[in-house]
Each structure stands twice: as structure tokens, then as C-alpha cells.
Amino acid sequence: MNRAQIIMFGVIGVIVLTALLVVFDIIPLGRRQRPPSIALTVWSLEEGRLWQEAFARYTAAFPNVRIAYVKKNQETYEQELLNALASGTGPDIFTLSNTQIVKHKDKLSLLPQEVLLFRPRDFRSTFFGAAEEDLITPDGNIIGLPLTVDTLALFYNRDFFNSANIALPPKTWEELVDVAARLTSYSEVGTVSRSGIALGTAANVEHAVDILSALLAQSGVELVNRKNLTSGLAGLRSPGDFVGPAESALSFYTAFADSVKRTYSWSSFFPNSLDAFAQGKTAIVFGYAEDVPRIEGKNPHLAFDISSFPQPKDTTVKVYYGRYRFNGVAKQSRNPVEAWRFLFWLADRDNNKFFADSLGLAPSRRDLVGGRPTEDYLEVFYGQVLAARTWLVPDDVKVSEILKEMINSVVNKSASAGDAVGRANVRVNSLLNPTR
């Protein structure tokens, strides 16, 4: 064959080979290559229906992704998660509370900022401030994304307020002391027969540790200093002060359970504070938005309303106490980038609002908390999100035990407020720095 024939047969051969590759789907002609199939598993605590709706919308947009959801029991969730991660059978995405960050941050995959083009400054402009402090590490890595937020607020019985001719709920602690005194009734022997406010003890006050934490934060106390990871309970006193801010906050909290003080309005003989509120045994309690269905379920006819958490008189900066759960990606996930993409999709405006509305909570996004919630009572909680504080605790269970013992020792008069704070300070420091 001459040269022209060789070239002609070569061209024909290339054409035939290319046609065969196209026919057998080896070369995708005229269409994009099909993305690989990806399977993700999510562990969380909410009802499956809520997540399934989100999954359906996500897989409609990304049909190559399959997502399975496993609902867990809150009581056993943490241990099951640890066991699954240790055996290599854990989920790709899992939920943690903000108080579990220190314990489990080593199990979380870092956000691939270069791939997904989302950096700390983007996080700060998107989510509320407390999450920024918790979920952005000192070296600028992002370990999770929050979805909803809850904050402590004041719940009050409208009938009791009306009967006592109290027009509005207290906005400051000074007002609260006066209102609680007016609403408290005593028996002939001096015990509280109807409580003005459920405050002062640890065992039967729901969220006692969180309420005390809010008082500490409003006093300028850092339970844990984020910069040097030391306890701030025994912080420096201002010149001329004989009582430290943590001691003052603890004394104020426990005064409501001290029978010799004017503030006396609660005792260990009452049932759990939220139950007592539902039963009409106390006029005021502190609770979260998540507590509303519980109270309504126990007493559907209770006439109660919700107001913002009280602040110190003449304060210029409001401080509330919050908690939240966030979603993170497991280090052992085989598809960490796709898992992070799904978390970003969950955190966009529409989905953030969908989850918040469905759960009866405030959203985590800054651009949503200024909007109107589906339920009127949630306006209080929306309004507290941006000024909410949280603690970065080394162990949520152990720190809770330390603070409860601090309260109990003062209520039982086995220690002064100063001694109780000093002991708690040592114990928190031992958790933060066990080798010191």
C-alpha cells in the first residue's frame, strides 16, 4: 500500500475505534460524565420525618447521592457514637451539642475551605457569634455548622400576675426580686406555699446550671478562658471589692432558697420547676423554647407567657445564655467533601428556616433572626440569639456536677459562697489541665 492508503486506513481505524468506545459508553459523547454514586449516613436526635423531607429535596438536586438517617436516643447517643466511631462503623455526619465540642473535636473532619470556598470571615457573617467562638478553632479551622439555637427565657403565669396587679414581667434582676416577693405566699409556719419564682436550688430547678451560667456571664465571669484554657471562676476582683463576681452571682442565685432572706421563694420540697409551673405552684420559671411543648402537654389550659431573660440594671450590653446543636463530618467518612456540601445545603436560608420552624426553635443564621417566626412566642427567642453566650467546657457532665455541688454546698450551708467558688475553680482547672 502506498502512503495515502495507509493514512486513509488509519483514519478509518480511529473512527471505528472511537465509535465502538462511544457505543459501549466508555467515551461520553455529547453529555457530561455521570457523577459517581455516593452514600452518606446521618445520625441525629430529631424525628426521621424531618430529615427525610430534607433528603428528598437534596437527592432531587443531586441524584447521585443517597442519604440514610438513623434516629438516636439522647440518653444513649453519645456512647453509641463513640463505640461506632471506634469500630469504624460510625456515620458520615453526626450531631453534637455545643457543650461536647472539647470532648469530641478530635473526631471531626475540618472543613475543606479551599474546595468549598468558605472561610472564617464567611462563617462570622453567616452565623450567630457564640457559634463563631465555638466552631472556629484558634488556627482558623471550621469544625461544624449550627442549624438552630435555643436560649433561656422567663416564663410567667399571667393569672398570678393579673391577680397581683403586676402589669409587665420583670426586665431586670432588681425588678424580679420585687415581683417574686409580691407573688410568693407563705404558710403559718413560714414555709413557701406558693412560689414566686423557682430559683435557688440545684436538684429541682430545671436548667439550674444554665441559669447560674447566665448570671456568671452577666457578671463578667468566664467559666473557661478560651485563650489559656483555665477556669475564670476565681477571677480578679475590682479594687475595693470584697466579694468576687462569681461569688456574688452564686450568692444571688442561692438567696431564693434561703429562708432567712427576703428573696426566699423556693425550697427543695417543691417538684421539678417546670412541673411546678405547669401545676400552678410557682409563678415564674426559666426555660428554653424546647420546654414550651412540655409545659403545654402537662397543662393545656395554663395561661402563661414568655419574656426575655432578665438583665442587670443599667447594663449597656445585654447577655443571654444559649445552647445549640451542630452538625459535623466524621474524620473517618469516605466522602468528607460531599458530606460538607450537604451540611452547607442544610445551612442555607430556606433549609435553616425549615428546620427551625419544624423544631419550634430559633434559626442559627444572622439574616433570619430578624424575621418573624411562625409562632409569636418565638419572637423572644429570636431576639436573644445574637447576644447569646456559651461556655467551651472540657466535659459537660463533670462541669455540671461541679456547679451543682457548688450550689448545694451554699444552700445546705456547708460552705460559704467564696469557699464554694474556690473549690469549684480548682476542680474545673483540674479538668482543663489534668497534668498540672
Image: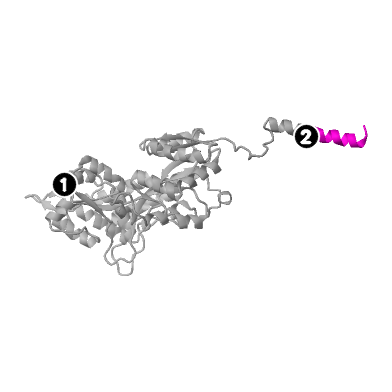
> In this rendering, is residue 218 above or below 298?
below
Position in image of residue 326 (x %, y %): 43, 46
Q: Is residue 230 visible?
A: no
**Start and end of the magenta stretch?**
1-15
Dot 2: element: helix
Position in image of residue 38 (x %, y %): 55, 36
Taking the view exactly as shown, the residue that stands out farthest to the bottom is 240
Q: Is residue 182 visible?
A: yes
Taking the view exactly as shown, the residue that stands out farthest to the left is 188
| Identity, as a three-letter code, of the amino acid under mark 2 | Ile
Callout 2 environment at 10 Å: few (<14), some (14 to 19), or many (20+)? few
Asked if the magenta segment contains residue 301, the reply would be no
| Identity, as a three-letter code, of the amino acid under mark 1 | Lys
Position in image of residue 311 (x %, y %): 28, 61
Q: Indicate which disc residue 291 carries.
A: none
**Residue at the spot x=34%, y=54% of the render?**
372
The quadrant of the image that shows the N terminus is top right
Asked if the magenta segment contains residue 5, the reply would be yes
| Type of secondary structure dominating the magenta stretch | helix
Residue at which label 2 appears: 15
**Residue at the spot x=54%, y=42% of the render?**
338
Measure the C-alpha gap from mark 1 to mark 2: 88 Å
Task: Judge depth for marks 1 and 2 and give the one in front.
Answer: 2
Figure quadrant of residue 263 = bottom left
Dot 1: element: loop
